[in-house]
Image: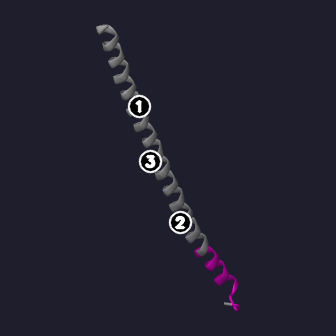
Amino acid sequence: MANLTTEQALELARAETRTLSDQLRQARAELHRMGIADQNRALVCAAVAGGVGLLVGVGIGLYARKK
């Protein structure tokens, strides 16, 4: 590898650039996928908490109405 011509070195650098570019693209896609999953989890938790709060509120209202 010590006796590379300029063209060979340039081609090797291009190949490394393509490889690193592909790895970066895959890492970005993975981070995006994880971000979406975390966002969906937060939305589901908020919906469940809202539903539980609504049920508790209705229960308290019905209990207070009976008294």
**Magenta-drawn segment:** 2-15
Position above or below: 13 against 26: below
Residue drawn at the location 58% of the way across and 75% of the way down: 15
Q: Position of residue 38 (x, y in %)?
A: 47, 46
Marks 3/1: CA–CA distance? 18 Å
Type of amino acid under label 3: Ala
In this rendering, position of residue 12 left or right of residue 30? right
Residue drawn at the location 64% of the way across and 84% of the way down: 8
Q: Nearer the viewer, mark 3 or mark 1?
A: 1
Numbered circle sitting on residue 22: 2
Marks 3/2: CA–CA distance? 23 Å
User: Could you classify mark 3 by the number of other residues whose Cα lies within 10 Å: few (under 14), some (14-19), or many (20 or more)?
Assistant: few
Q: Nearer the viewer, mark 3 or mark 2?
A: 3
Q: Which residue is mark 1?
A: 49
Quadrant of the drawing holding the N terminus: bottom right
Position above or below: 27 against 12: above
Type of amino acid under label 2: Asp
Q: Which residue is mark 3?
A: 37
Which is nearer the eye, 12 or 7? 12
Which image quadrant is residue 47 in? top left
Is disc 1 placed on a helix, strand or loop?
helix
Going from N to C along the chain, the mark reached first, 3 or 2, is: 2
Numbered circle sitting on residue 12: none
Going from N to C along the chain, the mark reached first, 3 or 1, is: 3
Going from N to C along the chain, the mark reached first, 1 or 2, is: 2
What is the chief secondary structure element of the magenta stretch?
Answer: helix
Residue drawn at the location 40% of the way across and 28% of the way down: 50
User: Could you classify mark 1 by the number of other residues whose Cα lies within 10 Å: few (under 14), some (14-19), or many (20 or more)?
Assistant: few
Which image quadrant is residue 45 in? top left
Marks 1/2: CA–CA distance? 41 Å
Query: Magenta segment: does it hold 62?
Result: no
Quadrant of the drawing holding the C terminus: top left
